[in-house]
């Protein structure tokens, strides 16, 4: 039996409850999301339940991380379903602020991480990570949690957030959680709901292609040439366009030609119908 989590719509309400939990000696974990929850998000909440006494999930479709022409308006919104899924995973609280609560009149502060945001999704979605760091820095300050959990599916986002937390001395430990995939290896994503059954079949081919490329690169193949071959295979499988397929250092995200002993990852983003899907996996 799951208990219904407490819903907070204001920062003040969340902070008041956090203060009570803290007074009782509880450790707090935060799971920031944009809603449209699936088993990937639930794995973040479950991990939080293992590591802390109370888990607060946030649901906020942050407008500042969407570019013009992106899917801000069509992004899935399903509050009741999301709250039920959080309850099922043992979440204690859900923070669902309005845009006005997060960005009141007069709001003027930007938070930008340089360097790590220049490549991959940062290059293809200008301003995206500035919006992410803006909202995540606020959520971390608002909750004052001991830890915050983020999925490795958004590997670059995790790297950017780790950098920001270190640079700004934010006293919250950042925890990365492995990617949850469906039975065919497709990384779960809220945006998979945009896909028709036929498109879903195509989408499931991407990780198969990437796995083969990662193996070839890991066994000594020239990294960027293998990436170009994988990009062509993804197009041949039925994706409409590729944003990138690149092999990069897992930590500093610098481009890699010869993998050697460096921890490397393969990163991909591609468009299918109205969905932009991303994935990444270890090369060695
Ligand atoms: N398949 C997954 N496995 C593990 N974590 C995930 C997975 N999908 C999303 N997450 C994590 O959940 C958190 C919230 O992500 P978000 O709400 O954007 O969901 P999403 O499914 O990634 O949606 P989108 O389609 O916007 O990429 C992020 O930390 C993200 O990395
Ligand atoms: C971290 C996040 C919740 C910030 O809006 C978002 O970028 C996401 O869902 O990954
Ligand atoms: N999962 C990252 C949020 C975004 O694509 O805007």
Image (spheres, rainbow, N blue to C red):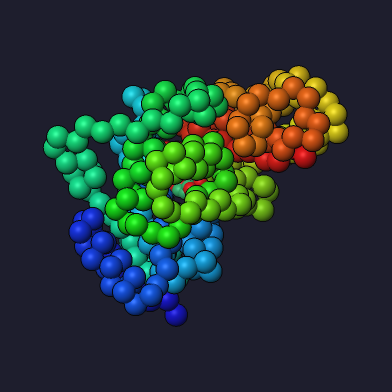
Point out the residue furthest to the left here: 105
Q: Position of residue 27 (x, y in %)?
A: 42, 68
Residue 256, above or below 160: above
Q: Position of residue 191 (x, y in %)?
A: 47, 41
Q: Position of residue 77 (x, y in %)?
A: 34, 49
Whether residue 91 is visible here, answered yes or no, is no
Q: Is residue 216 left or right of residue 106?
A: right
Point out the residue furthest to the bottom here: 1
Location of the C terminus (image quadrant)? top right
Q: Is residue 142 left or right of residue 176?
A: left
Point out the residue furthest to the right here: 219
Whether residue 29 is visible here, answered yes or no, is yes
Location of the N terminus (image quadrant)? bottom left
Q: Residue 233 falls in which quadrant of the image?
A: top right
Q: Nearer the viewer, residue 225 or 274?
A: 225
Q: Residue 20 falls in which quadrant of the image?
A: bottom left
Q: Position of residue 212 (x, y in %)?
A: 78, 35
Residue at horizontal 42 percent and vertical 76 percent from the top: 2
Q: Residue 258 falls in which quadrant of the image?
A: top right
For the image shown, how many numbered marks are present on the structure? 0
């Amino acid at each position: 039996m799951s208990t219904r989590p407490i819903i907070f719509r204001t920062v003040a309400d969340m902070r008041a409850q956090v203060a009570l939990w803290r007074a009782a000696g509880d450790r707090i974990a935060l799971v920031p999301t944009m809603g449209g929850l699936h088993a990937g998000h639930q794995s973040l909440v479950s991990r939080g339940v293992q590591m802390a006494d109370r888990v607060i999930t946030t649901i906020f479709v942050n407008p500042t991380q969407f570019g013009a022409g992106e899917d801000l308006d069509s992004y899935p919104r399903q509050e009741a379903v999301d709250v039920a899924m959080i309850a099922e995973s043992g979440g204690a609280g859900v923070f669902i602020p309005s845009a006005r609560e997060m960005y009141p009149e007069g709001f003027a502060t930007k938070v930008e991480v340089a360097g790590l945001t220049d490549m991959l999704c940062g290059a293809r979605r200008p301003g995206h990570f500035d919006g992410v760091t803006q909202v995540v820095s606020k959520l971390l300050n608002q909750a004052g949690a001991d830890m915050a959990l983020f999925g490795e599916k958004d590997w670059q986002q995790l790297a950017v957030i780790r950098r920001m937390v270190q640079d700004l001395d934010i006293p919250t430990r950042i925890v990365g959680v492995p990617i949850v995939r469906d039975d065919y290896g497709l990384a779960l994503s809220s945006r998979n709901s945009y896909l028709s059954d036929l498109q879903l079949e195509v989408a499931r081919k991407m990780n198969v292609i990437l796995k083969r490329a990662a193996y070839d690169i890991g066994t000594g193949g020239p990294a960027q040439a293998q990436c170009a071959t994988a990009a062509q295979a993804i197009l041949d499988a039925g994706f409409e366009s590729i944003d990138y397929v690149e092999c990069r250092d897992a930590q500093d995200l610098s481009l890699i030609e010869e993998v050697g002993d460096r921890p490397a990852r393969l990163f991909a983003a591609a468009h299918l119908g109205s969905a932009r899907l991303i994935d990444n996996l270890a090369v060695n």
